[in-house]
Image (spheres, helix red, strand yellow):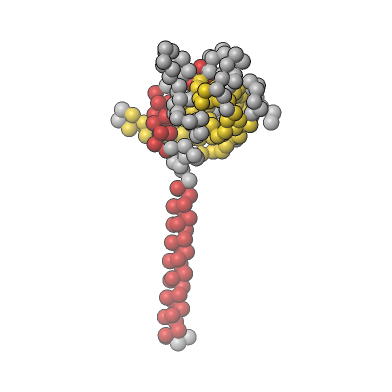
Amino acid sequence: MKPRVFIIFILMLFMSFASGDLWAKKKKSKKKKKENITKIINKKAFLDALLKLAEDEREPVATSTLVEKGRGKDYYAVDKMLDNEPETFWAEGAKGWGKNEWVAFHLPDGTTHVEITPGAGNEQFKNFNRPKRLYLDIYLVRLKREKETYKPKFKWLGRTEFKFKDEPKTIRRKVAAKLAELAIPERVMYVGVMIIRDVYKGQFDDTSISSFKMSSVWGEQ
């Protein structure tokens, strides 16, 4: 092989390896970008919600809650969905009908299904907006302790869609990911985010949900 040809061959070989290494790095960086990215919801608001759940995972976090004059600020609070009272309910309080308003919950590992009852109970069902369609997004969250607070890292695991008829009927759906048992030494939890996507219109322009329940039922769809 002539010296010039040999040098060109070596240069081409080097460039091939270099471009291959660059492609691998790009691929690796793309993979990293999949973590700590939210779906639909605002990332900063989600991180704030995770810090609140880290303090008390029993208390769901809502982006907004309706406050009416003459009623206490907790009258339509998000925990009304968890009190097993069919006539109490959470009502979002954002401007408009509540598109993309959301509630973040801690989901215990082993949870397989979620049940949601739309509306404001039977008595006020037509008064408030009722969800026509909701998303339930699942995230795996790692909470790293830094001084006196946590620094959350998270990964989106999947989405379950709920579609409702305009009636106060409970709908149960299987969650979009298997919530395997989590390691105890590490502060890790599953978080579900329920997102309002479409509604049936009521007399008042606030969307309401009567109940939210989690269960572990293996072997069912």
Residue 39 location, x and y as percent? Answer: 50, 40
Q: Residue at x 43, y 37 (%)?
A: 42
Residue 187 location, x and y as percent? Answer: 43, 29
Residue 214 visible in rendering: no
Residue farthest toward the left in the current orientation of the protein: 147
Q: How many marks?
A: 0
Left or right of residue 165: residue 153: left
Left or right of residue 126: residue 21: left
Q: Nearer the viewer, residue 217 or 164?
A: 164
Q: Residue at x 46, y 78 (%)?
A: 9
Q: Residue at x 48, y 21 (%)?
A: 78
Residue farthest toward the front in the current orientation of the protein: 203
Residue 1 visible in rendering: yes
Residue 55 in which image quadrant = top left
Residue farthest toward the right in the current orientation of the protein: 220
Residue 35 location, x and y as percent? Answer: 46, 43
Residue farthest toward the bottom in the current orientation of the protein: 2
Q: Does 127 appear above or below 11? A: above
Residue 95 in which image quadrant = top left
Residue 22 in which image quadrant = bottom left
Q: Nearer the viewer, residue 184 or 44?
A: 44
Q: Residue at x 42, y 80 (%)?
A: 7
Q: Does 11 appear above or below 178? A: below
Q: Nearer the viewer, residue 218 or 17?
A: 218
Residue 74 location, x and y as percent? Answer: 44, 16
Q: Does 7 appear above or below 182? A: below
The C terminus, quarter of image: top right
